[in-house]
């Protein structure tokens, strides 16, 4: 990653996303004072080493290298100075906790993945997870002391993803950590820590309801809510610790919650806090919230979509509970709704796998392709068993999408269903560029007419078998008429029509 380290007390006018930052490295070092393995010990040489490391890691406040909405088309991201389509799939949500993280990231990079989801979750689902707090000899946790292993794992994730050019979307709070069986052993449960009791914290011993009921006081602590100072101080300290690791990196996006039903004030507080903490260190970061409603037109989503001044992108993952044309139309509605302030729409969780409860494997692949043709800036297969993860099926779709991208970059396309005729429901989905190039996805074979009457250009045509991620047929077509398009067989297919002279 390139680094442009501005001198002290200079400002940046080249990048409108950049906040002026006098003495940038002095501020960048502040989070580590008294915090974990990076703690400066008053030795000037150590501080200089940290400053150089911070620069290498990407604390170039004014650099175009950072992940940010693309200047030429803010519906998409740019990273390291170039537009990117974020595609992903992985075997877990809290990836930083898995024991074979480095190998899994290598597998991702080889498949064309450049986007992961990382919840800061600590619930002991598989036995290798650890909590962020120190466990004392008496078996209880001290919320004022850290478990270095938790944070070492997090730092490894940030470093190794940066090395591979993989963008990390962090989810700060996962509501499932604090309810039902996962609440019983959790350090925030008063019986498990030495910092407060049930009366002081306002917590109960059990929260048996689904977290979607929003009855856990954990999510009502902020000053604009119940102002629970006893618990809030530890929550804020946790986020400060998280930022001390993540802010030096330029490949991180921030989502406040996992499919939340909480009050607007909860997520807004943390979004403003993270953004302001970054700004105080001369950085601009992009934050969002993930609402639980399946319908993107629901009032919950307006809390994000109506506030581009705070939420620099929107996560629309819960739309992936929908199928077929409804899924497509919901996506296009959101795309049109933000047209006044266009910004990226990410879908970090694509549900659908034969092993799960939220649609079939066919649904998972269909949702992926509708998203990237419909203008989503990021699309990631959800982890098993609810999603396809990084299965061979997921890899094939990602490879196929990268093949399409080499011919016609997705950020040059607009959804264009009006170009298709003789189409049945969920039969085909189209997007086209201003230059007449076109991509059409067929979920399961079929036949449609593609309107090319407005262009007489000769185009190269490639059929890509999505099940294999390979090109299986090519042709040359001329315009001035409607083109009969029929995939070579059943199953998932995508056809690309492009200008051969440009590729």
Image: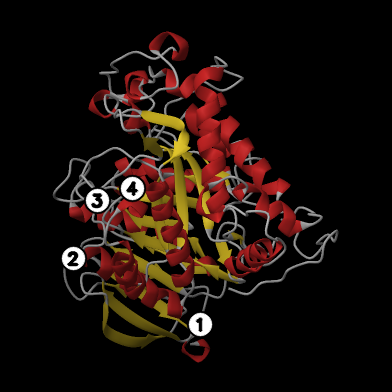
Left or right: 143 in relation to 6: left
The crowd level at tag 3 (other Cα within 10 Å; few <14, some 14-19, many 20+) is: many
- Note whether residue 290 is visible: no
The crowd level at tag 1 (other Cα within 10 Å; few <14, some 14-19, many 20+) is: few
Residue at the far right in the pictured view? 9
Q: Is residue 359 above or below residue 445?
A: above
- Counting from the top left corner in percent of width and height, residue 320 is at 33, 45
Looking at the rendered image, the disc whose residue lies closer to the viewer, 3 or 4, is: 3
Task: Classify residue 74 by image quadrant.
Answer: bottom right
Check disc 3 and report the residue beneath it: 387
Q: Is residue 10 above or below residue 287?
A: below
- Note whether residue 159 is visible: yes
Comes first in the chain, label 3 or label 4: 4
Residue at the far bottom in the pictured view? 501
Q: Is disc 4 in contact with disc 1, using a CB cutoff of under 8 Å?
A: no
Left or right: 30 in relation to 358: right
Check disc 1 and report the residue beneath it: 456
Image quarter of the N terminus: bottom right
**C-alpha gap between disc 1 and disc 2:** 31 Å
Q: Which mark is residue 370?
A: none
**C-alpha gap between disc 4 and disc 1:** 30 Å
Q: Which mark is residue 325?
A: 4
**C-alpha gap between disc 3 and disc 1:** 42 Å
Q: Is disc 3 in contact with disc 1, using a CB cutoff of under 8 Å?
A: no
């Amino acid at each position: 990653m390139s680094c442009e380290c501005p001198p002290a007390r200079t400002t940046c006018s080249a990048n409108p996303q950049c906040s002026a930052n006098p003495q940038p490295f002095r501020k960048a070092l502040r989070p580590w004072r008294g915090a974990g393995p990076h703690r400066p010990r008053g030795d000037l040489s150590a501080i200089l080493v940290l400053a150089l490391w911070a620069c290498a890691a990407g604390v170039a406040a004014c650099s175009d290298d950072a992940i940010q909405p693309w200047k030429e088309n803010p519906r998409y991201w740019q990273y390291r100075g170039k537009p990117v389509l974020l595609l992903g799939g992985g075997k877990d949500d809290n990836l930083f906790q898995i024991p074979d993280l480095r190998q899994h990231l290598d597998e991702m990079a080889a498949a064309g993945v450049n986007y992961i989801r990382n919840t800061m979750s600590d619930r002991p689902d598989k036995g290798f997870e650890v909590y962020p707090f120190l466990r004392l000899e008496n078996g209880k946790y001290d919320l004022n002391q850290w478990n270095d292993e938790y944070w070492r794992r997090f730092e490894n994730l940030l470093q190794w993803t940066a090395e591979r050019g993989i963008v990390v979307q962090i989810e700060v709070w996962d509501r499932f950590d604090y309810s039902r069986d996962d609440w019983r052993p959790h350090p925030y449960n008063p019986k498990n820590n030495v910092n407060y009791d049930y009366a002081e914290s306002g917590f109960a011993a059990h929260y048996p309801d689904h977290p979607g009921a929003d009855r856990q006081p954990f999510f009502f602590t902020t000053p604009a809510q119940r102002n629970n100072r006893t618990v809030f101080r530890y929550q804020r300290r946790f986020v400060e610790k998280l930022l001390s690791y993540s802010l030096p990196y330029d490949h991180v996006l921030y989502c406040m919650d996992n499919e939340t039903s909480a009050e607007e004030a909860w997520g807004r507080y943390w979004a403003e806090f993270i953004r302001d903490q970054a700004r105080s260190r001369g950085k601009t970061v992009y934050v969002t919230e993930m609402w639980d409603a399946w319908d993107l037109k629901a009032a919950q989503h307006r809390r994000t979509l109506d506030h581009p001044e705070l939420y620099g992108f929107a996560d629309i993952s819960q739309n992936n509970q929908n199928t077929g044309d409804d899924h497509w139309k919901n996506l296009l509605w959101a795309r049109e709704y933000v047209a006044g302030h266009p910004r990226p729409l990410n879908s970090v969780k694509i549900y659908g796998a034969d092993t799960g409860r939220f649609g079939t494997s066919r649904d998972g692949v269909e949702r992926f392709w509708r998203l990237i043709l419909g203008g989503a800036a990021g699309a990631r297969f959800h982890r098993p068993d609810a999603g396809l993860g990084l299965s061979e099926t997921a890899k094939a779709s990602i490879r196929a999408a990268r093949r399409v991208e080499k011919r016609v970059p997705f950020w040059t396309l607009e959804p264009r269903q009006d170009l298709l005729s003789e189409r049945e429901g969920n039969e085909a989905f189209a997007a086209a560029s201003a230059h007449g190039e076109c991509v059409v996805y067929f979920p399961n074979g079929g036949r449609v007419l593609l309107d090319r009457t407005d262009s007489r250009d000769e185009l190269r045509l490639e059929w890509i078998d999505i099940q294999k991620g390979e090109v299986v047929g090519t042709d040359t077509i001329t315009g001035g008429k409607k083109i009969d398009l029929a995939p070579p067989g059943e199953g998932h297919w995508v056809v690309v029509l492009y200008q051969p002279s440009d590729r």
